[in-house]
Image: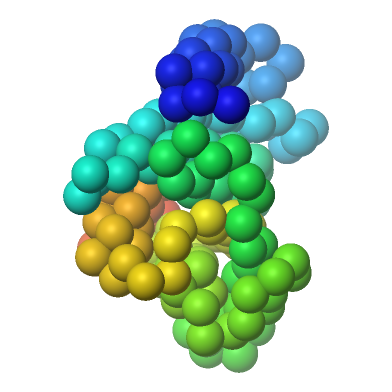
Amino acid sequence: MSSEELTTSLSALAVASQAPMASQIGSSGDLSSEGGAQVTCFSEDLHDVTLHFQIIRFSKQIYAWIGCNNSAKFGHLYAAATTRLGDGVSVTSVLGGTSDNTGSSMARRLVLKTGLNIILACNIPKDSPMLEAAAERKLVEKLRSLGYIRSKTGEANASTTP
């Protein structure tokens, strides 16, 4: 699949996801408890590499995928959630990868910032720490602009509460 085809496909998906059906979002703009979802897709050119992002927001969790260049591979999959005791976060590798991979650390930090469970699929080259940091920064910027990041005082934004 060429880069143009991937960009066109992502754009089509983003356009389709921008107009959610009434059954997906409640009248207040919050996700309904019946299992609605908000899908956001975007691409960024960082360090001479095109990164593609997909964010799916469910009522109590966020799924995020980061893909590199024109490769639509799934990559390593991590699940992260807060623990019942204290402010700890548990992370596990669901598919591929190990707990010391970048995706694992990224998923942990996203849970701390959002207060939500995170499922993260990451397909970024292992030998690019600058690209990994830039990808996480762009993802966090987008999550903040969508209202999914908790405020500095630790309270969740209105859009993160179910």
Q: Nearer the viewer, residue 162 or 54?
A: 54
Name the residue at 62% across, 22% down: 25
* Quadrant of the frame with the C terminus: top right
Name the residue at 76% across, 35% down: 35
* Quadrant of the frame with the N terminus: top right
Q: Residue 79's quadrant in the figure?
A: bottom right
| Residue 82 on image: x %, y % | 58, 75
Name the residue at 59% across, 39% down: 72
Is residue 78 shown above or below 57?
below
| Residue 16 on image: x %, y % | 58, 11
Is residue 119 shown above or below 129?
above
Q: Residue furthest front?
A: 2
Is residue 40 shown above or below 107?
above
In the image: residue 88, left or right of residue 61: left
**Can residue 151 be seen?**
no
In the image: residue 66, left or right of residue 43: right
Colour mode of the rendering = rainbow
Q: Residue furthest right?
A: 34
Q: Nearer the viewer, residue 106 or 89?
A: 106
Name the residue at 43% across, 62% down: 125
| Residue 156 on image: x %, y % | 41, 55
Is residue 19 shown above or below 4?
above
**Can residue 95 be seen?**
yes
In the image: residue 46, left or right of residue 10: left
| Residue 6 on image: x %, y % | 52, 24
